[in-house]
Image (cartoon, rainbow, N blue to C red):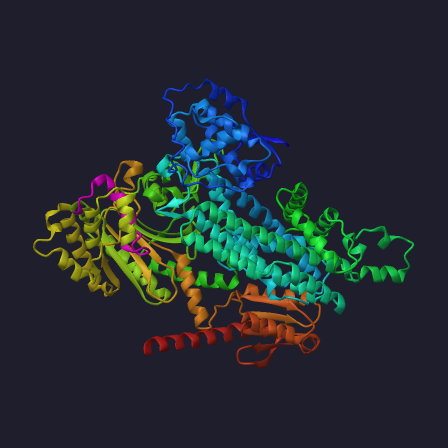
Amino acid sequence: MATSSSSAVSVGGKGGALTSSVVYAVSRGLISARIDSSALEKLSSSKKTSKIASLPDPSRSDGLQSARYLSPEDARAALFVILHKLCLSNGVGPIVVLVEEVLGFEDGQENLDFGSAFGFLASLCKLGGKSMAEIGFTSEEISLLDSSLAAAATAVAAILDAASAALTMVLDSAASLSCEAAAADPAAAFELPGSGDGFSIKDETDVAGDLKMMLFGSKFSGRLAADPFTGIPAVHGCFRSAVRAFHGRTRIELNSAIRSKKDADPWKHEGKSTMAGAALALCLAARTAGKFSIGRARAVIAAIADANLRAGVSHTFEVNCPSFDSLRILCRVVSEKAADEADDVEVLREAHKLVVKLREILAWEASIALFAIEKDEAFDKVRAEPNNSELNGSDLKKGEKKKAKKKKTLGRGTSVIRQRMLEFVNVSMDDSSALCNLARGLLGYFDPKCGSLDLLLKDVKEIVESNEIRRLPKIPKGTRDFGKDQMAVRERAFSIIVDVFKKHGATALDTPVFELRETLMGKYGEDSKLIYDLADQGGEICSLRYDLTVPFARYVAMNNISSLKRYQIAKVYRRDNPSKGRYREFYQCDFDIAGQYEPMEPDFEVIKVLTELLDALNIGEYEVKLNHRKLLDGMLAICGVGPEKFRTVCSSIDKLDKQPFEQIKKELVEEKGLPEETAEKIGEFVKKRGEPFEILRCLKEPGSPFLEHEESLAALADLEILFRALEKSKSVGKIVFDLSLARGLDYYTGVIFEAAFRGATQVGSIAAGGRYDNLVGMFSGKNVPAVGISLGIERVFTIMEQLAKDQNQSLRATETEVLVAVLGKDLALAAELVSEMWAAGIKAEFGIHKKVMKHIDRARQARIPWLVLVGELELEKGIVKLKNIDEAAEEEISRGEIVEQLIKRMETKAHVSSLSSSMRRAVV
């Protein structure tokens, strides 16, 4: 491990992990490296037990034919990483000491051969002024060193990692200055619209938030919203994401143990380099970032008012700043080398050249922006120092103060960035010729080896993390807010669902949102890892409920209930990876029947409830896939799967609706340990799906292996009873008998089913359930058979909302029937009228405003059917005006009769509406 001080870094001792920034500093000679004293002690106490290795014949070239030489900086980094890894190994004392000695040399590292162990040792000894025979290397040492030479690629990766990581904030800083100089509109560029589903691309939203913080307080007209600015969140977010991915790979390799020789290359996967792919992704993101940086610089130049100055700046920029073509060429080189499976070091070094080129472009962008800001007459000292005494001093006349206050001011963050850059690069900006000096100075400033850059990065970090202004809050990933329109859809759906549940005699039940962890664990198979655990708050280890079924079983067992038909609508929680249609917090609507019944009696009713629910919700086409757990177990036994692997294999089969069988087969063989022929047999069975009676006949044909399996035979008999009941209830047409349906939860024991939507909106499964005869017994020891269905209402809502959008329909967010509109400011009058209506059970709102159209517009917007209007004229006459908003009709009603007349008209309208609905249903 490595620990660092201001001038040296120690390796081999206990402490923090090696970082890319430390490797970069050592490679540039900013800090020296030394072996930790504890590591030296350990190395000196180790004894050689192997024979001295035979040295290669100097006349032979086979050991040196793979020679690889690095630049001095890269070689120094590679030496340092090799030293770090060797210090963590045993029996390599002489090599470690020699590497440390050579690493301390000021030059000569470029003569080190990193191509092979013998080549490296020969060049190392030559540089250290010692002979190989003098040191006496063992075979184990040479073998270990041969394996550790892959550290050369890791070292070059660390240099690239450090260089690109520093540019993430530099990129944002340069862009924020350009926004100021070009008067770009921060609101237009960085106000990302909410997705409405709780999901967003983190890096994009973070970039937008960071830039808003930097530009906070900027006084600009916001006249410009060009592509180079509006694209900042996406482009910079992509660069951040690529840098983060590359950093993660590099960090792991820097601190991993030395691999065996066959695994020496850390980046190879199935013969291809994963690091080359990561470097290419980084280059693509950097290329795009450079393109937009050039575009922003040109936009700033175009915003310079003085034509002559603008022409001079443009010429200087175009002649001296690297072009986008230079980025494109380097990116193509990286791509070609990666495709040709070239040495990773070559790929990484070319990628580093591209990042350095991006750094140069950013230096030019920042220089152009700073120059424009300094030369623009609208900017003066007060815009960077809003509290300057010149602005508030008594020596300024009133008119001068007013004029000064109109001066443009930089954002608080960009003020600091400008100040830091100009402090480092002290250049007189008399004309455009100063640009080259400014760009040259900033290029050195943006290099990670520049100590002053740390101050800028620290300032930027403090700015974006500042609580000086509050950023718009965000909700956790995998959760959603629901506005009034969405809640109208949800409440209507819940009403329909509850009506169906009650029609079947179910009673309501509610259970705690969290349970004892021991209650939940061991019930969900591999999905148990998705349970949300809570902190210990006093001796009880609790977790958020994963579903509503286990709490129901716990309730039945705890209260010694032998029979219960219940429904529950409540939120459940899963520590899942959020994606479209997949949430961490969501509602489930459960219907369960527990108790002893005739075979398939509750199973039939639960499935019938499911079809009634989906029909009543009117979401469109769907199918209910059905299987039997005992039939599934019988299938696995027939294929040769041991009982101990039934559940883990089922969890793989359950993914067939999302992945092709070839991928599932690979998982079964490589991860679950099944023979390939067993996986092939499973594949033949799980392809069987279709009309229930047809598949049933196929499975019961003479010679079918299921007929020789006792539990499978019982399952087929149960399914025949179930299918006949569903046929008589006219529900079997929605059922698909599917042998691939597995349902990964451990507690299922019999029939299992899952409903899938077949419309255009892709949401996956919308309901699922099955029989779980042993779950209650797991809590009480007394088995109470049970079967249930759980409706994934969140996905149903998604379908309903999309259907309403497609049909240009919307539900009313409120049930308000009357708007009491008072013309003027008489709150007492409004209170009197609306209170009479509330007392009569009328759903009413009130408003006070002097303009009639304000009230009418409010009623139309909220789709309130009736408007009761009263002003001074109506008060004098003792009347109110009653407006029918839908029919645009108006009549005068006596003040004392308004409540009675409203009730009468609403009842008449409701009756007509009911008749119309009945007639429509009759026609259908």
- Going by the image, does 709 lie left or right of 734? left
Q: Residue at x 31, y 46 (%)?
A: 745
Q: Relative to 728, does residue 645 appear above or below in the rendering?
A: above
**From the image, which quarter does the C terminus lie in?**
bottom left
Q: Position of residue 673 (x, y in %)?
A: 25, 41
Where does residue 373 sit, x and y in percent of width and height? 74, 59
Q: Please state the total of marks drawn on the protein image.
A: 0
The furthest residue to the left = 702
Is residue 557 visible in this depiction of the protein?
A: yes
Specify the segment rendered in magenta: 639-661
Using the rendered view, name the quadrant where residue 522 is placed: top left
734 lies above or below 263: below
- Quadrant assignment, res 722: bottom left
In depth, the one of 43 and 198 nearer the eye is 43
**Residue 321 position in % (x across, y down):** 64, 58
Horizontal side of residue 731 vs 135, given as left or right: left
Residue 314 sits in quarter: bottom right
**For residue 874, above or below residue 569:** below
Q: On screen, 778 above or below 212?
A: above
**Is residue 219 toward the left or the right of residue 860 in the image?**
right
Question: How far from the left and from the top, in percent, is residue 739?
Answer: 22, 54
Say whether residue 476 is visible.
no
Based on the picture, tell me whether residue 547 belongs to the magenta stretch: no
Front residue of this view, candidates 545 and 201? 201
Q: Residue furthest front?
A: 59
> Looking at the image, which is closer to me, 529 or 871?
529
**Residue at image point 20% right, 40% down:** 642
Is residue 643 located in the magenta-colored stretch of the structure?
A: yes
